Image: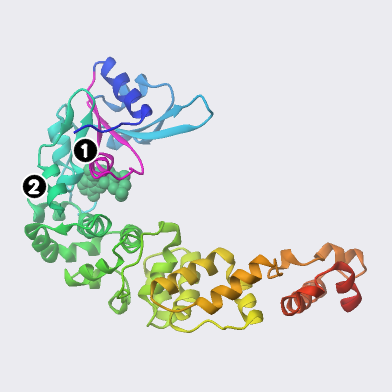
Amino acid sequence: MTINLPEDVIYMIETLEAAGYEAYAVGGCVRDSCLGRTPDDWDVTTSAMPEQIKATFRHTVDTGIEHGTVTVLCYHGDGTMGAYEVTTYRIDGNYADGRHPDHVEFTPSLTEDLKRRDFTINAMAYNCRCGLVDKFDGMGDLQRKVIRCVGVPAERFDEDALRILRAVRFSAQLGFEIEAETAAAIREKAPNLARISKERVYTEITKLICSARHERIEAVKALGMTPYIGEGFGVTEPADVSLPEIPTEKRCLRYAVLFRHALPETAAAFLKSLKADNDTIRGTVTLAPMLEAELPEDRYELKCIIGRMGREFFEDLLALKEELGQDVSVVRAIYVDVTAKEEPIFLKDLALTGSDLVKAGVTPGPKVGDLLEAMLEAVRRDPAKNAAEELEKLYL
Ligand code: ATP
Ligand code: MG
């Protein structure tokens, strides 16, 4: 097994080794590399203590120094920079609250560090000198496509309940099954989720539904987690077709799918209970009803909708409706034509601006906005009117 480590990672590992320490790429980046996926980020685990990591590299940030994590910054010749979390081998102490270890203990043993990690596929380390270090048959589980806890699952979920949701999230992202003993422990320990902060629940649910298998949200219910997710989670309904992976920034598209048969208040209450941001709440509540209803096939009405939503959001909506099996060909044809002809849709498309109006003698204030709105309506109906002289003649 050979992994092509990025140059920065090779540099950090070799620098730590030259200083007399051990160092490996570890966790998600090793898992993703073995699967032929491109890792989002690269983490390094090392026998060096945090102070020793800081002494070894010129540019570091104390990210979580009490947990042994230092961020190392690598500056490149072309002006770009890479940031990497370098963490000292550690053993997590007792978890009294089922969320955070009471204390962490540094250890000279890579095996001990791998043992504290959640799943076998996340507990592999790699460097160029030693190759793959895989103490828990993570590679076998990658091949069998299985999510399996390192150690005794029920104990691992008592330590940290977030792992319960991570198991389902990874199963959705990777298309893996959850191994039987791990699944049984999830069922048994689901109530532990009550101790997890809503922000962390939201992050995991979001990653799950933005994955290529959003329908695995049903596993969250089947494994008994419904009461611990958020208010109204029970009414969510995945689409009956599979949907492609999307970046989590576009999460409102997936939340809209899940709540497309629900009342907007229900979707909003759910997202609020998870402390979701306002953009996600607004986007979800706007989109959800549009997924069931048909879009107008009237040019002017479509422009009004696009004007309210923005182009990108509207294009996402069209694509999603197609993925859901709806025929939007007429609407799409209108949209393509409007775009090709550069017909005005937004205030910024108007041939006159607010300051043009003021210069022409309109009193600054609400009057300006009202006039602009009136002009926008007119040019959406008739693009030929979108010329400064024409608008001045009509409105001033
Ligand atoms: P992704 O970045 O896609 O979420 P990842 O596996 O890299 O996946 P991170 O949260 O970045 O996940 O964590 C990095 C590594 O730290 C994991 O691969 C795992 O080894 C370990 N880890 C993270 N969270 C936990 C946890 N709650 N319990 C035990 N180990 C964990
Ligand atoms: Mg990661």
Where residue 320 sits: x, y (%)? 43, 70
Q: Residue at x 22, y 40 (%)?
A: 103
From which residue to which does the magenta span run?
21-47
Crowd band around label 1 with a 10 angstrom C-alpha radius: few (<14), some (14–19), many (20+): some
Q: Is mark 1 within 8 Å of ligand 1?
A: no
Crowd band around label 2 with a 10 angstrom C-alpha radius: few (<14), some (14–19), many (20+): some
Tell me whether circle 1 and circle 2 mark residues in contact (CB < 8 Å): no
Which of 188/129 is in front?
Answer: 129
Task: Provide the secondary structure element on which disc 2 rests.
Answer: loop
Residue type at numbered disc 2: Gly
Q: Is residue 211 left or right of residue 322?
A: left
Residue 151, disc: 2
Q: Does residue 163 show up magenta in the picture?
A: no
131 over 120 or under it: above or below = above
Marks 1 and 2, Cα distance to the nearest angstrom? 18 Å
- Residue 101 in view in this figure: no
Residue 80, disc: none
Q: Which quarter of the picture shows residue 271?
A: bottom left
Q: Which quarter of the picture shows residue 195?
A: bottom left
Q: Residue at x 16, y 68 (%)?
A: 223
Q: Is residue 203 left or right of residue 222?
A: right
Which of 182/318 is in front?
Answer: 318
239 over 143 or under it: above or below = below
Where residue 331 sits: x, y (%)? 55, 77
Where residue 216 sits: x, y (%)? 25, 66
Q: Is residue 210 left or right of residue 370?
A: left
Residue type at numbered disc 1: Val
Residue 104, disc: 1
